[in-house]
Every structure is written in C-alpha cells, then in structure tokens.
Image (spheres, rainbow, N blue to C red):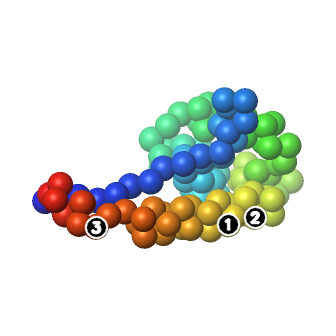
Amino acid sequence: MQVRLHVKFWLERDGKVLFGEGRQQLLEAVASTGSLAGAARELGMSYRAAWGRIKASEQRLGIKLVEPEKEGHRGMKLTPQARQLMERFQRLQAKIERLCHEEADEQWLRELE
C-alpha cells in the first residue's frame, strides 16, 4: 500500500472562508451544468447550501461570482472575475502541491508503507 501526500488549503479572512477547493468545485460545476441547481445536484448538496456558499464568498470577496445566463432565463454562468479567481487559485494550488512534494522526504514516506 503506497503512502501518498495530500495538501489542502483555503483562503479565509477573520476566520471565515473566502475561497477554497469546495468553492472551486462548486463554480466548476456551475460552469459545466449551466445552473446552480445542476451544480448542487452534481455535488450532492442542497440548492440552498450551494447558493449560501456562493453568496458568502461574493460578499466576503466583494465581487460577483455568478450571473444569469441571459435576461429572463434560469441558467447561470460564471463572471470574468470568478474565472480569474479560479485560475489564480489553481495556479497557487499547483505551486503549493509541487513545493510540498519536493520537500517531502521520499525515503520517509516509503518507510511508512
């Protein structure tokens, strides 16, 4: 059985989540399904919980993350600010994971197997 190193991080202010992997997955699901209801279903969460997380992040970040697909339609899409936030978060996540794997003592990990 192989031992694997996992890294999880998120951004918070005053102890409240601004953005993290869960929000990233939620926004990815909104982008792929075209709706918040579809995203919530895909992630196995309630619509209310999904909407609450998005609204909390929008309020704490001071930017809109989602907007109606078209006026008068029920669909939803990501804002350019959301896409930029997601790209930056992904780049930071990749750097942190790379650094942690570089710093991990591979011999030590093998000894734990």
Q: Which mark is residue 84?
A: 2
Q: Which residue is mark 1?
A: 87
Q: How dense is the environment of label 1, judged by Cα within 10 Å: few (below 14), some, or many (20 and up)?
A: few
Residue found 48% across the figure and 69% down from its top? 98
**Residue 39, position as x, y percentages in the image:** 56, 49
Q: CA distance from mark 1 to mark 2?
A: 5 Å
Mark with earlier residue (1, 3): 1
Left/right of residue 46 with respect to residue 84 in the rendered view? left
Given contact means CB atoms under 8 Å apart, are the residues at marks 1 and 3 in contact? no
Residue found 50% across the figure and 66% down from its top? 99
Given contact means CB atoms under 8 Å apart, are the residues at marks 2 and 3 in contact? no
Quadrant of the frame with the C terminus: bottom left
Look at label 2 and name its amino acid: Gln
Residue found 16% across the figure and 59% down from its top? 111
**Residue 83, position as x, y percentages in the image:** 73, 63
Look at label 1 and name its amino acid: Glu
Look at label 3 and name its amino acid: Glu
| Location of residue 36 with respect to 16 vertically, above or below | below
As rendered, which of 2 and 57 lies closer to the eye?
2
| Location of residue 111 with respect to 16 vertically, above or below | below
Q: Which residue is mark 3?
A: 106
Left/right of residue 23 with respect to residue 73 in the rendered view? left
Left/right of residue 75 with respect to residue 44 in the rendered view? right
Number of numbered discs present? 3
Q: CA distance from mark 2 to mark 3?
A: 34 Å
Given contact means CB atoms under 8 Å apart, are the residues at marks 1 and 2 in contact? yes
As rendered, which of 76 and 100 lies closer to the eye?
100
Q: Is residue 73 visible?
A: no
Q: CA distance from mark 1 to mark 3?
A: 30 Å
